Image: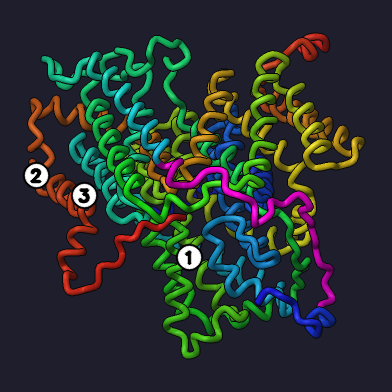
Amino acid sequence: MNLLRPSQLMSQTDLEIVVEDPTAPEHDSPSVVSSGTVEIVVSLLLLALAATLGYDNWRTGISWDSTGPEPGYFPFYLSTILGGGSLYGLIVALLARRAASETFVTRAQARRVLAVFVPTLLFCLVTQFLGLYVASFLLIASFMRLVGKIALWKSLLTAFLFTAIMFVTFDIAFDVIMPKGPLEAAFGY
Amino acid sequence: MEAFGLLVHGFAVLLTWKTLVLMMVGLVLGIFVGVLPGLGGPNGVAILLPLTFTMDPTSAIVMLSCIYWGALFGGAITSILFNIPGEAWSVATTFDGYPMAQQGRAAEALTAAFTSSFVGSLVAVLLITFLAPMISSFALKFGPPEFFAVYLLTFCSFVGLGREAKHKTVISMSLGLLLAGVGMDTVSGQLRMTFGTAELLRGINFLVAVIGLFGISEILLTMEERLALRGHAASISLRVVLSVWKDLPKYWVTLLRSSFIGCWLGITPGGAIAASFMGYNLAKRFANDPESFGKGRIEGVFAPETAAHASGTAALLPMLALGIPGSGTAAILLGGLMVWGLNPGPLLFVEHKDFVWGLIASMYLGNVVGLMLVLTTVPIFASILRVPFAAVAPMIVVSCAIGAYAIQNAMFDIWLMLGFGVVGYVFKKIGIPLAPFTLALVLGNRAEDAFRLSMIGSGGDLKVFWSNGLVGSITTLAIVLLFWPLIDGLLSRAGSTQGAKPASP
């Protein structure tokens, strides 16, 4: 249905915009983990969280005193609800046959997702030590160059321009101060 | 007609060069956000929120709401030209919009989409103008039990009416309410759920969570898909615009029907996505020749776009009148109100007249300016999609980090954002809805306060929630909605047993 018939192509005077994605994940890539398994793991984690928070609230006080309910009262019952919900989810996931075979993520997809996630993680780490703007420059330049295979000069220029615009917009024009490191300090910011 | 006079005053507040410029900036940024993959209405608004921290509340809300309108307009561009819905609520627009573009009628489809968006929001804004002041003055009589009952109603209707598996909605909501309670307890001053860490003293900020859940996770999800696209470049000529507008009166039934659907679903937490599909399906059902839908029929663009925009706009009504957002983006705007030191709720109409009427006036003006802007600049925005995602993705990551850090000037929040990004990615993939989580996180503290104040007032007796006709009927309605699937099942026992199947988005 989405295919253009030649006659329509001929009459199409508008320019077409075409963007290719050479590294797109293949459709036949093998599954890494099934949705069912992920649901079981998430339910277990939520159950553990509910138990931890429930215990902490119980410690804070879940009963009534002279002024009304104690601070832990409301959240304690919420953690009970969360625990109940995740327990139910766990049972449903364990019983479901169909969902167990559904793919959560394929290997090709996982590779692409990690290609964004790992740089993002590194970006946060660099921000902690060198400041946000240096990290921003490094992230954009390296991501464009290494993941996007874009020409080095384009990558460097884009990264520099974007970072500079952000710096001017936030730190100077709008007075929203970002974390900075030794480089900015050298320039007196 | 008091509303009319106040509205005129609102326009007067608005008509300064500074606000108009901010409005344009907001609209342009919004269209960007709507067009780019991996960015949507809620996270766009959340990321850009820090820009407004140093502004006065009126300018800030004008800019933010214009980002919202812009995002609503922008979603239609990619749906029609590329068959890629920029937003979930534009999926229905692709059904007829893309075939029209293939037939070389892209300009016509775009004009139809923008015009109907405009009509939809206009109807919703009219509703807000006249209904919101009435609801808020009624709500001024509310005490804590009434407020808690209204919060309960919101939460219960999510569980009862949502299309996701019920236990997943419950998980998402209770998790949001729990995380809202982390940090210093507002009533007793005691620390809760901090486990001795100093970083958690501040609590988990709602906006940080939103940026992670919607911004970072969206990029991860986008990368999973094939990002290749091919589409039509289109420019809109005045002749096309006028010819579409000339035919507009012919479709008044469709426009009106979709507007009503949108307004209704926007006020109740049904959302723009449901509204757009419902608008489309009803237009198809009532048409003389339903089979012509999906092949490039202009009504197939009018119907979903009108409904989506009416709904997106109407979602602001409960936020303004009661302090309860009707959509994810409205929830973020509500978070913004709190950052600017305004207390959302019915008192807003009394204490901050300038602000409220400035916002309502900006809805009118923003939509008019937005319509003109988008009609004239479509080719520019369509070509943004030429920018490779490998360049866009890291820029979005950096913007998210800036947004998350700026809220409380805390490095910890950047890590929190990353954590929520992973949580959002996993939740979306296994069908745990994020909207209830967002709503619960932003309303959690207020719901708890209302509950505790009512309990203190009544000496711990739950009967306070049935102590008078008003609060009693709201509470009862909430419980009915919570168990609605069961009640509905009992009522139509003769029917088949389908419908219990969990739908994943």
Q: Which mark is first along the chain, 2 or 3?
A: 2
Q: Where is residue B489 shown, x and y percent of the image?
A: 20, 64
The residue depicted at 42 percent of the width and 83 percent of the height is B286
Q: Which type of secondary structure does the marked residue at label 3 adopt?
A: helix
Chain under callout 3: B
Seen from the viewer's position, the closer of residues B371 and B431 is B431
The image quadrant that residue B52 belongs to is top right
| Residues at discs 2 and 1 both on one chain | yes
The residue depicted at 55 percent of the width and 25 percent of the height is B407
Seen from the viewer's position, the closer of residues A51 and B483 is A51
**Magenta region:** A12-39
Could you say which disc has been placed on residue B276 in the image?
1
**Position of B225 compared to A68: left or right?**
right
Say which amino acid is labelled 2: Asn
Contact, CB < 8 Å: mark 3 with mark 2?
Answer: no
Q: Residues within 10 Å of mark 2 (few under 14, many from 20)?
A: few
Chain under callout 1: B
Q: Nearer the viewer, mark 3 or mark 2?
A: 3
Q: Which mark is first along the chain, 3 or 1?
A: 1
**Position of A81 compared to A154: left or right?**
left
The residue depicted at 79 percent of the width and 57 percent of the height is A19
Label 3: which residue?
B478
